[in-house]
Image (cartoon, rainbow, N blue to C red):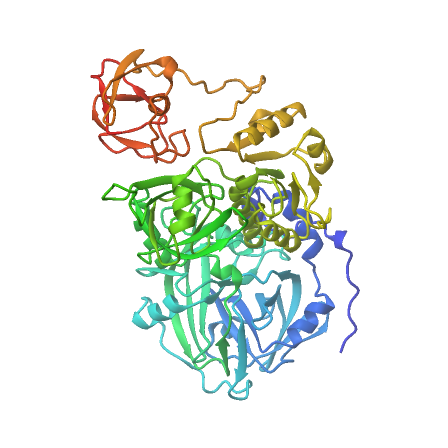
Amino acid sequence: MSPALPAQPDDSQTASPFHAGEQQLQSENGSREMMEKFGRRVIRPFMPDQHRAFFAQLPFVVVGAVDAEGWPWASLFPGAPGFANSPDNRHLDIALNAAQTDPVRSALRPEAPIGLLGIEPHSRRRNRMNGRVATLGEAQVQLRVDQSFGNCPQYIQHRDITFLRDPADSTPAQAAPCFTQLDAEARRKIGSADVFFVASAVEARDNPTNEGVDVSHRGGRPGFVQIDGNSLIIPDFPGNNHFNTFGNFLLNPKAGLVFPDFETGTLLMLTGTTELLSKDAPEIRGFHGADRGWRFTLDHGLWLRDALPFRAKLGAFSPHSLMADTWAERSARAKQEEGRNAWRRFRVARVEQESAAIRSFYLEPADGAPLLPFEAGQFLTLRARSKTPPAGQAVAKVLSRSYTVSSAPGEPYYRISVKREEQGEMSRLLHDQVTPGDVLEAKAPRGSFYIDPTETRPAVLLAGGVGVTPMISMASHVMREGLRTRHLRPLTVVHASRDSAQRAFADAFRALQQATEGQIRYLSILSNAAEGEKPGEDYNGTGHITDDTLRQVLALDDYDFFLCGPPPFMQGVYDSLLRLGVRDARIYAESFGPAALTRTADTSASSQAMDHPAKDEAEAAEVRFASLDAAAQWSAEDGSLLELAEAQGLTPNFSCRSGSCGSCATKLSQGRVSYRSPPEAEVEAGEALLCCARPAKDSAPLILDL
């Protein structure tokens, strides 16, 4: 073995490790400066000893090359461990066990650019090496290193490899004639694939060390590649932000794809043209987990039968693959989107007690179709009928109420966590009568109170009592997205509870804190700590969340604040934040119930949304409720029709009091109503949302079926 050449220091590179196409996409992604610093540190012109040892233990490497006509190809070169060997940190020798008819082997020639990927499915490790052919013989090729760097393990499925024949024996491999159309066999293979590899290339002009050929891995659940005629639509999941493949596509829209069949040893090899697709492109829009996508259109391809001397048994899917869609799920969800405002049946899968007063209900679609997506912090509107009618009534009353979804987006269920309230008919029904197997109705989640996990500004979640339900959804979502995108938004969760018996999700928050190594921080404030409970272990403070509490737990920084809890809690914390100098625009609040948060607008704001009467709103009107004998006289001082109904002693269904949930929709038998701002919830013809409706000008007297 030749002695290893001395490693260059990390800051020795004067030229960027990224070419113009990669730099452009990094800039568009907002990561250019970060990736330049990162790339100069981790992309080396030599192979670290760890990478050299890694390649030496592999049973195959993925190789990318460009043929004489300029078409990229990708293939798998197999061999017994040790067939790839590094004599020094600038070179890698590879025994040529690939079939003579393999188009990648045929493309090898002195000084040809080559992309190399070492991947170990059972450990989910992978490393990249891009370089040039230094020497080429009948049985071996030596590659000279241009760039060497590691890759993350995302989307790699676990597989165990078993050799069936001598890996140096390539005689069984047979190449079928080239084709230009995807036939039924190719469609079946692509449609069932959970992995493929893609080669891309740019001509080496300005800087040969960062221009040339690259080969990379793509993985997902079977069905993650969509076939569209002679084209493939491929979602692009979050990766390392290098944009090696897409940067090449930007400058040279061609690609070589190889779909390995690990059960038969056959390779499906394709080459063709590419088109980049944004996240909002119709072809890719709505595919959960995809940041963008691309279209591959076949020019020509071939089957290389029995090319692999080993078989690889599929084990567990990558957790990241399980978090992303398939095209079948995306299609089914698109159909569901058409009925987003409709009632849908859900089966109660399980019920769990979260605290002395809070119980969680896990709701799964009774129709088996996918859940509609939602944002962490939003609520759904639930409808249920009591199993036993009240005394003296033949039919039980149908109740409707909105509850925050406490599960995170991406889970296979909606979870609501409900506090039992003695005055709350719906909460009593859920706690006292609903059991696993029961069917409830719900509308898809909605609402404007939610967190953006991609934001870089740290956030503080302040919860009082059952107001913790949107916060556990937000924190769980931030962690899941952090794993998926490798950007975790820093969170501080402060939860005020009466005592530990009333406190929900403390263990779940602590698990998130541990899993994120403190990037999600959880603090529990108890009004009354029980004897024997230890501060710093069972809770973090006593009393209420005050100005001093916030000063003590928060470092000096620019935060977004999210508040949820009972009205007095919300107002008290909001006022504390204002006293500490937090701008109103940085405070987001959610509350269900009759009291709204009284906010103080930022004086620096150029304009503020004011609740002015609508142009078609009446100054006074007559309103009749079907259950009352006498008419009520409404004036602007009476507020909404919901407030008027409550003043008459009626108790209509409601939740948000802002036109978001639709639970207060009531049949309007006569007259017209006006809204000061358009309701977020859909309003059916002949109905009015009481919480935000007022009589319209020149309307006939209103008659409400209430």
The reply, left or right, for residue 678 in relation to residue 318 is left
Q: Is residue 372 left or right of residue 220?
A: left
Task: Point out residue 402 in the picture as x, y percentages from the top left corner.
Answer: 40, 39
* Residue 528, image x, y percentages: 66, 41
- Quick one: quadrant of the N terminus? bottom right
The residue nearer to you, when weighing 530 against 162, is: 530
Q: Is residue 477 visible?
A: yes
Q: Residue at x 35, y 40 (%)?
A: 400
317 up-or-down from 675: above or below: below
Query: Is 108 drawn above or below residue 552 in the view shown?
Result: below
Which residue is depicted at the point 50% across and 85% down? 170
**Foreground: 314 or 565?**
565
Q: Farthest residue toward the front?
A: 392
The x, y position of residue 579, in whole percent, is 66, 23
Q: Seen in the image, is 441 located left or right of residue 83?
A: left
Q: Residue at x 54, y 35 (%)?
A: 565
The answer to whether residue 155 is visible is no
Q: Indicate the position of residue 269 as horizontal and vertical percent values.
A: 43, 70
Quadrant position of the C terminus in the picture: top left
| Front residue of this view, candidates 510 and 375 | 510
Residue 432 vertical position relative to residue 553 in the rendered view, above or below: below
Q: Residue furthest top?
A: 619
User: In the rendered view, does 170 fall on the left or right side of 490?
Assistant: left
> Quadrant of the rendered structure where residue 144 is?
bottom right
Relative to 571, is 309 above or below? below
Total marks shown come to 0
